[in-house]
Image: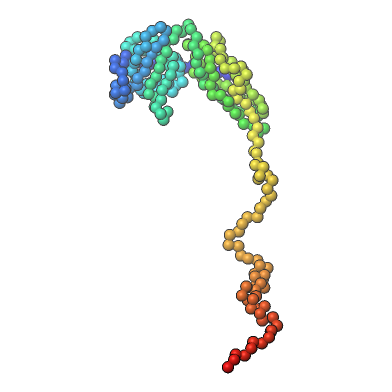
Amino acid sequence: MTTTTHASRLTLEAQVRRQTGGRHVQTLRRAGKLPGVVYGLAGASVPIEFSAAHAEHIVHSGSHLVDLKIDGKVEHVLIQQVQYDFLQAFIEHVDFLRIDPSHKVKVKVPLDFRGTPKGTKEGGILEKQIAEVDVETLPLEIPDVIRINVEHLELHGILHAKEIPLPAGSRLLNPPEQIVCQVRTVKEEIPVAEAEAGPTEPEVIGRKPAEEEIEGQAAAPSGKQAAAGKQAAAPAGKQAAPAKK
C-alpha cells in the first residue's frame, strides 16, 4: 500500500564566507552564489557561500540529507531551513544542521498519493487532508517521499495516519487517528430562496403589445376627450343672458 523512496546523497561544495552584511550578500548573488550557515553538534556556527544553481537543484530534488564539502572537508548535514524571496520564487539563504548518523532526527516527509479510489466510481472524490507527515528516524533512513496507494478506498473510506507503514526504526509523530485522506460524496446544494421560488416569466424588452391591449387603449378615451364628451352629453342649462346694449 505504501512505499518509501530514498535518493542518493548529494554533495554541495561550499566555502567559508569571510565577509558578512547586506552589501556582501548582494555581491554574492550577482556572482551566482548564495549565503548560508552550518551549525550543530556542539560545533561553532560557520557562515558559508555556495553555488545558487547547485543549491536550488538539491533543495528542489526533495533531498533532506546532504554531504556538505567545506574547503575540502565533508560534513553530513540536514537542510534545516530554506528562506525564499517575498515572491517565493528564489532561494535567498539556507541553514544546514550537522547531524550524527547514529542519532535520530525529526523531519517532514511529503506524501505522494497514487491510484484512483474505488469509491470514485460511485460518485465520490478523493479529499486529501494533509500533504506531509512528521517522522523521527535515523538520518540515513530519511525517505524523500512516502507513496500511498489509495485504490482500495471505497466510498466514505478513510485512511488514518497510523495506517502509513514507515521504514524500520522510524516513528510517526502525527496523531495516530489523524485523517490523511478520505473518499466522500459531493452533494450539490440548492439555495432555499431558489428552491422555494417558482418559475418566473422572463421580462421581454420591446415586446409587441397584444391585440387586446391595443383595442383596450383605442377604446379608452384620453382625458381631454373624455371631458369634452361629458360636456357635450350634459343637458343644456339656462341660456346665458344676452349682453346688455
Residue in the foreground of this view, choosing between 116 and 16: 16
Residue 164 lies in quadrant = top right
Q: Position of residue 165 (x, y in %)?
A: 59, 15
Give the position of the C terminus as an image quadrant: bottom right
Residue 210 lies in quadrant = bottom right
Residue with the most extreme bottom position: 245
Residue in the foreground of this view, choosing between 181 and 97: 97
Residue 70 lies in quadrant = top left
Q: Position of residue 88 (x, y in %)?
A: 42, 28
Residue with the most extreme front position: 244
Q: Residue at x 46, y 8 (%)?
A: 101
Where is 100 relative to 153, above or below?
above
Q: Position of residue 105 (x, y in %)?
A: 49, 11
Q: Residue at x 40, y 17 (%)?
A: 95
Q: Position of residue 37 (x, y in %)?
A: 37, 15
Left or right, 162 with reference to 107: right
Q: Residue at x 57, y 17 (%)?
A: 174
Q: Residue at x 56, y 15 (%)?
A: 173
Q: Tell me the colour scheme of the image.
A: rainbow
Left or right, 93 with reference to 187: left
Give the position of the N terminus as an image quadrant: top right
Residue in the foreground of this view, choosing between 154 and 174: 174
Left or right, 244 with reference to 109: right
Q: Is residue 58 visible?
A: yes
Total marks shown come to: 0
Q: Is residue 89 visible?
A: no
